Image (cartoon, rainbow, N blue to C red):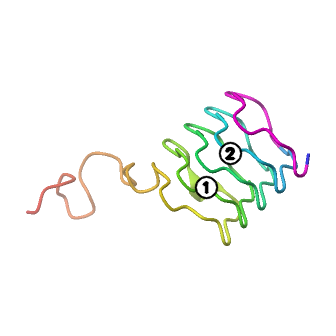
């Protein structure tokens, strides 16, 4: 589906695994809980999209535009590649804790200074 226009659609919980979404227009699309495993999103326009809880394991986001996207609950480290992806204004990248609550490597609770 290269260059497909799915802008503004609700694709919540859709199974798009192994999809070719190369250069697709997914601007303002809802992909909450979508299964995007091993999808090719190279150069896709995902500005303002909602990907809360989407599974992106093995997906390629090279050159994708994710500005202002909601990535809460998305493990972007599971993506195969994100070379040149734009992430300005995206939420959920640094807001979610990387370390689970509890003692840290230094034996302090998160936020404590010791």
- Is 85 covered by the magenta stretch? no
Left or right for 29, reference 87: right
Label 1 packing within 10 angstroms: few (<14), some (14-19), many (20+):
many
- The secondary structure that dominates the magenta segment is loop
Image: 43 above or below 47: below
* Quarter of the image where one finds residue 22: bottom right
Image quarter (top left, top right, bottom left or bottom right) of the N terminus: top right
Residue closest to the eye, 113 or 16: 16
Q: Residue at x 55, y 45 (%)?
A: 74
At which x and y percent is residue 76? 58, 54
Q: Residue at x 75, y 59 (%)?
A: 60
Q: Which residue is drawn at 48% across and 43% down?
A: 72
- Looking at the rendering, the stretch of residues picked out in magenta corresponds to 2-17
| Sooner in the amino-acid sequence: mark 2 or mark 1 | 2
Left or right for 105, reference 66: left
Image quarter (top left, top right, bottom left or bottom right) of the C terminus: bottom left
Residue beneath label 1, please? Answer: 66
Q: Which residue is drawn at 36% across and 51% down?
A: 97
Residue beneath label 2, please? Answer: 27
Left or right for 24, reference 32: right
Find numbered disc 2 in the image and state the secondary structure of the residue it sits on.
Answer: loop
The nearer-to-camera label among 2 and 1 is 2
* Quarter of the image where one finds residue 64: bottom right
């Amino acid at each position: 589906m290269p260059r497909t226009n799915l802008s503004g659609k609700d694709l919540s919980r859709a199974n798009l695994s192994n999809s070719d979404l190369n250069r697709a227009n997914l601007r303002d699309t809802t992909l909450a809980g979508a299964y995007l495993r091993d999808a090719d999103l190279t150069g896709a326009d995902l500005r303002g999209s909602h990907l809360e809880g989407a599974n992106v394991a093995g997906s390629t986001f090279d050159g994708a535009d994710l500005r202002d996207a909601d990535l809460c609950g998305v493990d972007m480290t599971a993506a195969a590649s994100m070379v040149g992806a734009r992430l300005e204004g995206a939420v959920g990248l640094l807001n979610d804790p990387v370390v689970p609550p509890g003692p840290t490597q230094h034996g302090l609770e998160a936020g404590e200074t010791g």
